[in-house]
Amino acid sequence: MRSPHDFRNGESPTYRDRTHFHSTVAAQKLRRFNSLILLLRLASFSFSLASAVFMLTNSRGSGSPHWYDFDAFRFAFVANAIVAIYSLFEMGVCVWEFSRETTLWPEAFQVWFDFGHDQVFSYLLLSAGSAAAALARTMRGGDTCTANKAFCLQSDVAIGLGFAAFLFLAFSSCLSGFRVACFLITGSRFHL
């Protein structure tokens, strides 16, 4: 490898010439940081999948209302299903990063992809949960919940699980934002 003093005017080192040295402490910090992101993605996947399943199975027969009869409940189901698929994909990316010690895509693209999608899907879950919660509150004020308590209870559980998925995805988004900031400042996803 050439030293930085070997380059002449205007020359810059190639990618191969730049190596990143990480001490064992830095490698452990990096592993812990990646483990935390994986844990948050696993929690987001679990809660959004559970919310989608609870909403999907919320039908009690022909006399009871069905979740697909209400736009807000359909929106909540679709949003949670999308986030479950996205979180599953991101867990795969985290496992890839653990096993190969490199990102799936180029680092700049990976950083912005994670941050952008975490933001978009967080807001998607928040808006879907808010719309479904407003509808559930309206239904509680009417005759629907007095006649079909189980339907309303299961809707409330699905909405609560969706909000929990939002919280975990929002925390994951904060860590993705930290990675973007580190990338902009140092040129690497990690400040180490």
Image (spheres, rainbow, N blue to C red):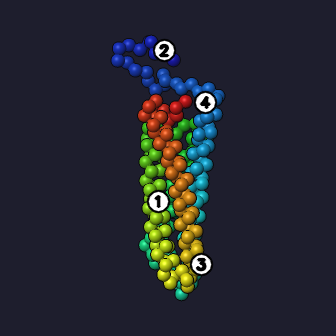
**Residue neighbourhood size for the residue with mark 4, other residues' Cα within 10 Å, grouped as few (<14), some (14–19), many (≥20):** some
**Measured Cα–Cα span from mark 4 to mark 1:** 35 Å
- Kind of residue at badge 2: Ser
User: Can residue 18 be seen by looking at this rendering?
Assistant: yes
Say which element carries label 2: loop
Residue to which mark 1 is pinned: 126
Q: First in sequence, mark 2 or 1: give its number.
A: 2
In the rendered view, tell whether residue 83 sits above or below residue 97. below
Residue to which mark 2 is pinned: 3
Q: Position of residue 186 (x, y in %)?
A: 46, 30
**Measured Cα–Cα span from mark 3 to mark 2:** 71 Å
**Measured Cα–Cα span from mark 2 to mark 1:** 51 Å
Say which element carries label 3: helix
Q: First in sequence, mark 4 or 1: give its number.
A: 4
**Viewed as shown, does residue 19 lie left or right of 25?**
left
Q: Position of residue 67 (x, y in %)?
A: 50, 75
Residue beneath the point at 53% across and 66% down? 159
Q: Position of residue 88 (x, y in %)?
A: 55, 54
- Kind of residue at badge 1: Leu
Residue to which mark 3 is pinned: 150
